[in-house]
Amino acid sequence: MKIAILSRGPKLYSTRRLKEAALARGHKAKVLTPLKFSIVVEQGHPRLLFSNNKLSRYDAIIPRIGASITFFGTAIVRQFEQMGVFSLSASQAISVSRDKLRTIQILSRHKIGIPMTAFVCTKHGVDAAVDEVGGAPVIIKVLEGTQGVGVLLADTKKTAHAVVETLQMARQNVLIQRFVKESKGQDIRAVVVGNKVVAAMRRIATDDEFRSNIHQGGRTEKIELDAEYERTAIHAAQIIGLRVAGVDMLESKDGPAIMEINSSPGLEGIERATGVDVADAIIEHLEDQVLFPDIDLRQRLTLNAGYGVAEFPITDRSTLVNKRLGASGLSQRDVQVLSILRGSVTIANPHGSEQLLAGDSLVCFGKLLTLKTLLPAPERRKNARHELQDAT
């Protein structure tokens, strides 16, 4: 297999390790600098130039796109995708993970712990935002910071005002987030590859520093994740759409709280702390997945008029609650259940013997008229009200 590693730093530890792992497993691997690409868009013939020359054919790419070139870098990844080249990380997932607000907005729909967060566009909303997240002290973050840069602790509302105003004057969008005191300057980094956590470490801040990032002087220790933290890390990465991710979690009194999801996790700290060959695990996963590129189900499965993909909850009042899937009557109504979402667990392609429980969500494909009838009545009325309000 011929693999392109998209990175501006061929000598960086992570880039070098991925290339070494690919070569060790018998593949051809080359590091290509994203900024040397040119995109050519033509109907039926999307293509890329590299250093003004025609790019040779690659079987797969591993994006290591730096935050400073997210827009252009994801455009390059997207062009590879249009050319039918498998990308270990989808362009859409990279874009989502780079925006902290967008990430937690998406996660908030699911049963995954996140620190309470507020977003304001002017200094006039700071007081209310601080109150909403539980009062000072609060964490203030720029939306696209990395490695702990752009993360500040404000002890009082007055300090929060000053920090937000200063960052907004520098044209930075910021989040105001609850300070999880019990984490005590510690967090957990779990590296998810596919459907498992291959390595995990605890990062511990030095002295009075509240940021535990290695780049901020934090130290690390190998840990064995308990089941709840492992499920949360895997589920979060899957929701964002990342096959490989560095998931950062705080140890709150209520359990794991997702702090950040990194689409290009650094390998040096985690490999040295745990002794795990993470690079090899990534290349092995790439081998398994290269024949299965991403498919947008909503686009592909809604080509037939009247059919679509929908997700609906099983409530206590649902006629389906506690029934076996095979006895639910859904298949007889031309509705296929693609997966059952149960907490942080996804049951893919469920068998007819699977029992439907209150709190489950079903992802289904079928006739839109039938799917509409499966939504709980209060949900339909609430959605109708929202649509009316939006229209006015």
Image (tube, rainbow, N blue to C red):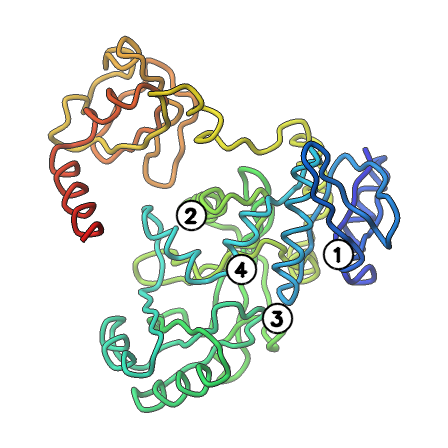
Neighbour tally class for label 2: few under 14, some 14-19, many 20 plus, Cα within 10 Å = many
Q: Residue furthest top?
A: 332
Q: Residue at x 41, y 62 (%)?
A: 101
Q: Disc 4 marks which residue? A: 98
Q: Amino acid at mark 4?
A: Arg
12 lies left or right of 305: right
Which of the 4 image quadrants contains residue 27?
top right
Q: Residue at x 47, y 30 (%)?
A: 299
Q: Please state if 169 lies on the left or on the right of 179 as rendered.
A: right
Disc marking residue 34: 1
Structural distance between the alpha carbons of marks 3 and 4: 19 Å
Q: Position of residue 4 (x, y in %)?
A: 79, 45
- Numbered tag placed on residue 232 in the rendering: 2
SS at circle 2: helix
- Looking at the rendering, which quadrant does residue 83 occupy? top right
Residue found at x 42% / y 25%? 302
Query: Which of these two is toward me, 49 or 77?
Result: 49
- Residue 45 locus on image (x, y percent): 73, 34
Residue indicated by mark 3: 214
Mark closest to the chain's N terminus, 3 or 4:
4
